Image: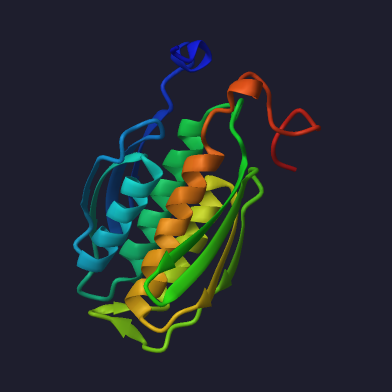
Amino acid sequence: MPDTAQANRPARTATIERSTKETQISVAVNLDGTGSYDVETGIGFLDHMLEQLSRHSLMDIKLRAKGDLHIDFHHTTEDTGIVIGEAVKKALGDFKGIRRYATAIIPMDETCTRVSIDVSQRPYLIWKVDFSKPKLGDMDTELFKEWFQAFAQNAGITLHIENMYGENNHHIVESCFKGLARALREAMEIDPRAADSIPSTKGKLGS
């Protein structure tokens, strides 16, 4: 049987453009997609992580970014987190019916990472992730925290990420993105038992 509440709900899509002296970025998202992605940031490893985010959340993402990569990858990495976060928040609309909370535990070979989120309009990041090397390919590993911070702040999401154990830096960061993806998929899903309700006793999300 089709979900009539979902069928009558406005499409949860959004488009965001951001242009500064450091980056020019456009993104389109569909929260109720199929995990289709078309991502070009100029940073191969970041593209790979954003593709993982799309595929495992089932959120469609189309993103184009041009940044000052001749300086370093910082601005492009941070600003893609900003625009994807803004797009997710915009696409969520009135937040009615979402499950709001979710936790994902993602194993990846020797690595295991736990990601918990509250889609609450109260942004916060807890980041308990350490890397044994300063770079993955050409990308500084410290930039991954910057991406998650920017995403959480602009999506209005409380986000806790803890790498419980692991050795391979690639596996560690990929498990973080996959964990976010799986948690987002569950938390943003419409709960058919409460499809027209704000998931809060206050009647609103946020402060």
Q: How is the image coloured?
A: rainbow
x, y (%) of residue 68?
A: 24, 67
Whether residue 125 sits left or right of residue 38 in the image: it is: right
Whether residue 157 sits left or right of residue 35 in the image: it is: right
Nearest to the observer: residue 40 or residue 186 = 186
| Image mark count | 0
- Does 130 sit above or below residue 207? below
- Does 37 sit above or below residue 43? above
Name the residue located 69 percent from the left edge and 32 percent from the top edge.
Answer: 199
**Snapshot quadrant of residue 162:** bottom right
Q: Residue furthest right?
A: 201
x, y (%) of residue 157?
A: 58, 49
x, y (%) of residue 6?
A: 48, 18
Name the residue located 46 percent from the left edge and 40 percent from the top edge.
Answer: 88
Whether residue 180 sits left or right of residue 16 in the image: it is: right
In the rendered image, which quarter contains the N terminus? top left
Name the residue located 56 percent from the left edge and 41 percent from the top edge.
Answer: 187
Name the residue located 46 percent from the left edge and 68 percent from the top edge.
Answer: 146
Nearest to the observer: residue 79 or residue 54 = 54
Whether residue 190 sits left or right of residue 79 in the image: it is: right
In the rendered image, which quarter contains the C terminus? top right
